[in-house]
Image (cartoon, helix red, strand yellow):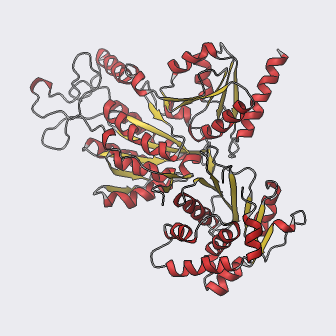
Amino acid sequence: MSKRYEMRFAGSGGQGVILASVIIAEAAVIAGLNTVQSQAYGPEARGGVSKAETVLSCDKIWYSKVTRPNFLLALTQASLDTYTRELAEGAVVMMDDGLNCPADLDPARVISVPILQTAKEKVGKAFTANIVAVGAINRALRLFSDKDLMEGVKRHIPAGTEEINQKALAEGAALISDAQAEAFAQTIG
Amino acid sequence: MSKAVLMQGNEAAVEGAIAAGMRFFAGYPITPSTEIAEQSALRLPQMGGKFIQMEDEISSIAAVLGASVAGMKAMTATSGPGFSLMQENIGYGVMAEIPCVIIDVQRCGPSTGLATSPSQGDYMQAKWGTHGDHPVIALSPSSVLETYTLIIRAFNLSEKYRTPVIFLMDEIVGHMREGVELPNPNDLIINRRKMSFHDGANKECYYVPEGKYVPAMKPFGQGERYNITGLAHDVSGFPVNSNEIADKLVTRLLDKVEKNVDNIVRVEEYLMDDAETAIVCFGGTARAAMDAVNAARAQGRKVGLFRPITVWPFPEKKLLARLPQLKNILMVEHNHGQMLLEVQRVTRCEKPVHFLGRVDGTVISPDDILAKLNEMEDTNHAE
């Protein structure tokens, strides 16, 4: 990765998209990449649109915000509809499969997977949806080794929750097929 | 595995402050500075320090001043609304010469404004928020690592010149996370210059030798009584109504900073040696300006960045030194034109001074700055 890779994570306040963005950034630091992470949200603690951003690069990163995301994670319809308008050319969109995919998105660039359902039913805790998403993102884009990613997760979760988070990562990764992983890893320069 | 850790600007402020010796924090949490209070609450007890959540910002700055007089390096953190409440006691700190650091993580105002959005609208308030003629030292960081190193400098300047130092952050840097490897700060720390109880003739608490500007701190609450007041006072600390003594005092307070301005002022100059256009920009906004300078250079244009790190006093000598080589200046800041006034004053508008500002809570991007540079070029051709 030599040039700037911009990632945006969007959802409703309380879904943990900021933490997902932070964990990707933390794994990037562990892997020795440059990264800047930031977020934008309203004054509410729950609800409202929540947006977090992680920029990755081998070069020094100055401007900290994302303007044309190469990757978008959307967990709510409102965030999906809002942020698909600003995507970079060839951007990859990961969305919860309970959402309606906007007609103008290239289906070949969309990963529609049951993130919320997997967290609730397979992992057994709805609040692990953000970690499920992180697992799916890393499997699809092949950003970091499993070890670096888990270390990134560990630095941001309460002690004693390692097991359930490990499971959430694994269930998230399992949502991505080998063919998808092959195809989408090519999208990162 | 890299030794770096992912750290937020607000967290770096606390780690830097602790490295500088800060062992007392009193504050009232407010977005976007809240993480500073949270991190201080976590870290200070581990260091044998004290954290107090106060009932408001007036009491917060009062507690900080009291702790500092009692011998602690002390800090508070707030945002616009709380910074407004602190102003009277900041003036007290200046008049009574009490070292401390006040962090303002700026958000959009006026009033409670846009709580979670970035701004640089408190730039003039940092200088003129408290009443009366007074010296102000204010520093503004642009990155997480610089937040760490610069707040150590804020404590050092505060101790060296016995005056409150404003650490003027913004939401961009406060809430941003970057990978950082924190440097060893041990060589960098300046500790308080204390006056001995038994200095004979020099024992008056505000005694300053001829030709010096800063009195040593006399230990307070350790046996010998002396007076501290915001009223004009003589060397004993007691109030006086003498015009001569008041004039001497206020002049000395201002001289502490003015006579040492070359030691206090710092700027970063990026690609300025052959620059014909200088972008003047500080704090988190400068990150967009760095990308804009690089992009403009890639197009063959002679653009450089002049970034005040010390934002008060404004680095006027350093900007004036660049003025002869410049064709024009572009001031970029997240307000309606505050540092712009300083740039216009210092340069006397001898070269055209253009302005790009914003107050809607969104962040100025490199593309916005490039568009403004293009507009300036078109204006030049039209002339």
How far across and how far down the image is residue B84, in percent?
51, 41
Q: Residue lying at the far right in this picture: please name it.
A: A103
| Residue at position x 70%, y 42% in the image | B365
User: Residue B86: horizontal and vertical position, in percent?
Assistant: 45, 42
The quadrant the C terminus of chain B occupies is top right
Residue A98 visible? yes
Which residue sits at x=56%, y=38%?
B283
Residue A10 against residue B87 in the figure, above or below: below
Looking at the image, can residue A76 be seen? Answer: no
Nearest the camera: B4 or B186? Answer: B4
Q: How many marks?
A: 0
In the shown orientation, is residue B123 left or right of residue B48?
Answer: right
Q: Quadrant of residue B163?
A: top left
In the picture, measured across the screen, residue B276 lies left or right of residue A98, that is left
Above or below for B352 versus B367:
above
Which residue is nearer to you in this view: A164 or B157? A164
Q: Is residue B156 above or below residue B64?
A: above
Please indicate whether residue B25 sits to the left or right of residue A189 in the image.
Answer: left
Considering only vertical position in the picture, is A175 above or below A91?
Answer: below
> Residue at 51% of width from left, 37% of height from top?
B140
In this view of the protein, which residue sits in the foreground, B5 or B174? B5
x then y, percent, for residue B369: 72, 35
Quadrant of the rendered image containing residue B332: top right
Locate residue A70 relative to residue A54 in the image: left or right: right
Percent from the top left, x then y, of residue A12? 69, 67
